Amino acid sequence: MTEPEHFRLQKILRIISFWGLLFFVTFIPISKAFSTIGELLCGGSLLISFFFKDFRTAFVQRLTKNKALWFLPVYYGLYLLGMTYTKDFNQGLHELNMNHYLLVIPLLVIGLNPSSKEIQYILYGFVAANLFSGIITIYLRVYTAVLFDSEPYMPSPFIMRPRASLNYALSVLLLLNFLKEAKGILPKLLLTLLTIVMFLSLIMLEGRIGQVAFVIAFPLFIAYRFLNKYRFLWFSLFLILGIGGATIAYFKVGNIQRRFSEAFKEFKDYKEGFKSENAENSSVGRRFVYFENNWKAFLEHPIFGSGTGDFRLVAEPYFTSDTYQIQYNKPHNEFLECLVKFGILGLFIFLGGWISNLFLAKKDVLYYSFTIIIFLSMFIESTLDTQSGITFFTAMVSLFSYKSELSDQ
C-alpha cells in the first residue's frame, strides 16, 4: 500500500469511527438495536486501524495520558474477578456481556482522538434524540392524555421511564450549555425554545427521579456555568429557590402531585405492612422489600460479595421466605447491587474510582451535574442493570472525562 493510500484509508476509518460513535450515542435514548449498530461500526473501524503502527502508537499515548478514562475498565475488572468465584457461570457470562460497555466505550472514545468540537457534535446527536422523544411525550399528553398505551410503538423512553427522565434532565442542561456558547440572536432564540420543550417533556414524562435530580443539578449548573463570583452562595440560593419551586409545583401541577402522592402513599403502605394494598401493586413499597431481602443476601458475603453471576442464587431464597411473598427482583439500588456482587471491597473500588475520575475532570460543571443526576438515580434504581442505563452512564462518563482532559492538553 502506498503512503497516500495508507493515509486515505486511515482517514476513511476515522470518519467511520466518528460517525459510528455519533450513531451509538444518538440512539441510546431511542433504540437498542440501532445503538448497537453504531457501536459495531465504531469498534470495527478501530480494530482495522490497529493494523497501522502509527495508530497503535498514538492510541497507547492517549490511553496513558487520559487517566480519567481508566475508571470504567477498572470497574469492569471486578466483573472479571467475580467470575473466579461465581457458581452460576452462565449468568456470570451474561453479566460480562451486559456490562461490556464499561470496557469498550472508553476505548472507542479514546480511539477516535476526537477534538472537543467532535464531542460536541456527539452530544448534539444525543440531545436531538431526546428532543424527538420529548416532542412525542408532549404530543401524547396534550392530545390523548395517555402516554403508555402507545408503548409498543414508541421509542424506549416510554418503556423505561425512570432512565428516560435522566436523559431528559441532562438534555435540558446540555441545551442550556449550547445556549451559553451560541452566538447570534436566532440561534439563541431557537435554543431557548428547544430548552423549554425539553423541560416540559421532563415534567410530562412523570419520571420522578429525573425531576428530583434536575431540581438539585440545575442550580449547581447555573451557578457555576453562568456566574463568575460567589458561585457557592448563588448555588445555595438557587437550590433553595429550586426546592421551593418544586414544592409549589407539587401542589399546583397535577401530574407531578399525582406521581409523588402515589410514592408517599405506597411508602406508608409498606410501613404498615401493606394492609391497604397488595405489595405487588406498590411500586415504591416493593423497592423497600427488594432492598431488605437483597441486604440479607449481601450479609452472606460482605467482604468480596457472592460473585458476578450469583445474584439470584443468593437473594431469591429470601423472597420465598418473607411475609410479603413478592417475586424475586434486584434491589433497585445500584450501590446495594454492587455490594451483593462484589462486597464492601467492590463498592469501595467503584466509588473510589468514580471520585478519582471526578477529580481528574478538572472542574467540568456539566460533568458534575450529570454525576448528580446519575448518582441520585442509583439510590432507587439499579441504573447500570439495563442497556439503556449502562450505555448512558459509560458514554457520558467517557465523553465528559475525555473532553475535560483534552482541554488541559
Image (cartoon, rainbow, N blue to C red):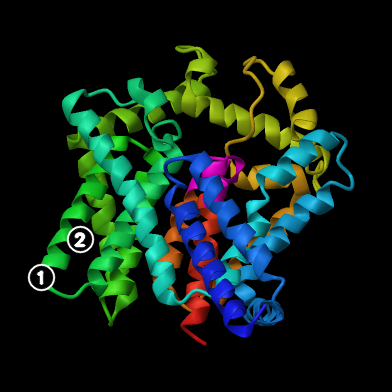
For this rendering, which residue is in front, 89 or 237?
A: 89
Is residue 385 in the magenta section? yes
Mark 1 or mark 2: whose residue is earlier in sequence: 1
Coordinates of residue 211 in the picture (x, y in percent): 34, 45
Neighbourhood count class around disc 1 (C-alpha, 10 Å): few under 14, some 14–19, many 20 upward: few
Up/down of 244 relative to 229, above or below: above
Up/down of 6 relative to 219, above or below: below
Write down the residue under mark 2. 191
For this rendering, which residue is in front, 50 or 111?
A: 50
Q: Which residues are magenta?
A: 377-391
Q: Residue at x 45, y 58 (%)?
A: 22
Q: Residue at x 56, y 55 (%)?
A: 41
Write down the residue under mark 1. 185
Kind of element beneath mark 2: helix
For this rendering, which residue is in front, 118 or 303?
A: 118
For this rendering, which residue is in front, 91 or 166?
A: 91
Residue 233 in sight: no
Q: Amino acid at mark 1?
A: Ile
